Image (tube, grey):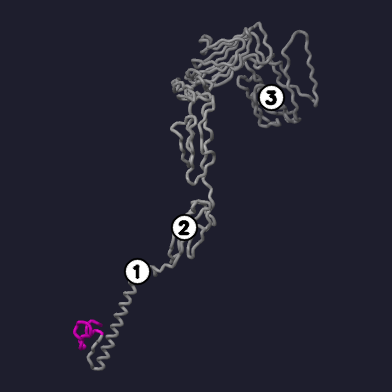
Amino acid sequence: LYDSYEVEYLPIEGLLSTSRHLFIELTTDSAGTSTGAALRYQAFTTGHCYEPFVRYGNLTSSDNTWALGALVEFGCDPGYTMEQGSVTIECINPNNPQWNDTEPACRAVCSGEMTGSAGVVLSPNWPEAYDKGQDCIWGIHVEEDKRIMLDIRVLNIGKNDLLTFYDGDDLTAKVLGQYKGSKSHFKLYTSSADVTIQFQSDPATEVYGYGNGFIIHFFEVTRNDTCPELPEITNGWKSSSHPDLVQGTVVTYQCYPGYQVVGSELLMCQWDLTWSGDLPICTRVVSCTDPGKVENSRRVLSGPYFTVASTIQYICNKGFALSGNSLLTCFSRGSSGPRWSQKLPRCLPEAFEPCRHPGTPTYGIPSSSKIQFQARETLHYSCQAGYQLLGEPVLHCVPGHPSQWSDLPPVCKANLGEYDGHSFQDFRLDRVQIAFVVFISILFLLITGIYFFSKGQKKPVQLSLFSSLPYENITGESTFDTSVH
């Protein structure tokens, strides 16, 4: 039990009841008033340690049932410092389990030194009231080539209390700002890598209640990291990508309905802390903007400009069907400016009925045997070996209602122009040569037969076969004793 941080002493351990019931009585005297008492209670299972607790902090445990041997590690929230107790405690003693040390306390303390790139400074005892007559000093230090941004999110101190910011590492530095009483959210930027914060509370004034004090967040930032503030524009407004105009911040200008931006609508804070362009302006819109083209279509314009009453007609290419309105008209909508009457249409592929398989010719081979072919698909034909294809070898499914094939299927006929791998012409030449050889052979046999017959008859041979030739008659055997054999 402790008295809202009004006493320095914190009990090492709490009070444990011996049963399921506990009676608490608070008795006050008439000597004066106090801020009250803070008490936390919890039930826990016999044979386990009670669940530890740290206000304004956090903890991690190896066993969330808090059984024997459980280890718990504590940490404090930003702006708080761990005091009293231990960072790590363990549940010990099998006969009567208990923590080997008390939980620590996290408190917002008076004064301190901070070197992190970001952090929090809280008034003493925050969120509870700070003490009277305090003089606290905090020092914040970042890297030498950096600067510090102070984000004062809460400032609610007494009218006789004083919060001072010094642009340096001691109280002799230039004063950035000095405040008393209450002030809404604001920010300060240092010109060096150090800042000193001093808080002095009136020794004659007592402060009561929650929320009296201050919360200061600090961040490390680059040196001279802000561009000058940009003005608003007539008939428009601006928005920023970052609440502070640091390097890389983009400011976007937009116009009210019926007006359009002339100039660059995006301005960036450059590395030399200048803006990337000149301030734009908003002018009244007097025509529609180009709505753009539609894929798989062509458009017909009523004129070279998109003034009020001008039209655009969209016509889909062959094989595509229009979805939406084909005609757009630019018309005036008063203060909101000219607009197109319709949204852009679309040109979608036209749906056609499929072609049925035209059939397979005898001895033919189709490239596909599926039953239906979609529009624009093709079907190829070839013939088996020894057969010749007559007709179109490729058929196209022509889109339509219904779709039709581009031609009749071809036919396959026996190839008479081929014989054992030779052409018909070669075959004809072979037949002439064979006939000539047969003729010579028969002629030889005939002459030989006549010769031997004449020799047997002892008569000269006279061949009427050659009687009409302009040669002398052949008489005598010597004539046949030549190379005719």
- At horizontal 49% and vertical 15% (from top left) the residue drawn is 191
Marked residue nearer the N-terminal end (2 or 3): 3
Amino acid type assigned to the residue bearing label 3 in the image: Phe
Identify the magenta region.
Answer: 465-485
Q: Is 468 in the magenta?
A: yes
Which label is found at residue 53?
A: 3
Q: Nearer the viewer, residue 268 or 195?
A: 268
Marked residue nearer the N-terminal end (3 or 1): 3
10 Å neighbourhood of mark 3: few (<14), some, or many (≥20)?
some
Distance in Å between CA atoms under marks 2 and 3:
89 Å
Distance in Å between CA atoms under marks 1 and 2:
33 Å
Amino acid type assigned to the residue bearing label 2 in the image: Asp
Marks 1 & 2, CB-CB < 8 Å contact: no
Q: Is residue 455 visible?
A: yes
Give the quadrant of the N terminus: top right
Q: How many marks?
A: 3
Decide if residue 19 is on the left or right side of residue 208. right
Amino acid type assigned to the residue bearing label 1 in the image: Gln
Mark in the foreground, 3 or 1: 1
Decide if residue 304 is on the left or right side of residue 111. left
Q: Nearer the viewer, residue 96 or 223?
A: 223
Which label is found at residue 407?
A: 2
Q: Nearer the viewer, residue 212 or 86?
A: 212
Distance in Å between CA atoms under marks 3 and 1:
110 Å
**Residue 129, image x, y percentages:** 66, 13
Which label is found at residue 425?
A: 1
Mark in the foreground, 2 or 3: 2
Q: Secondary structure at mark 3?
A: loop
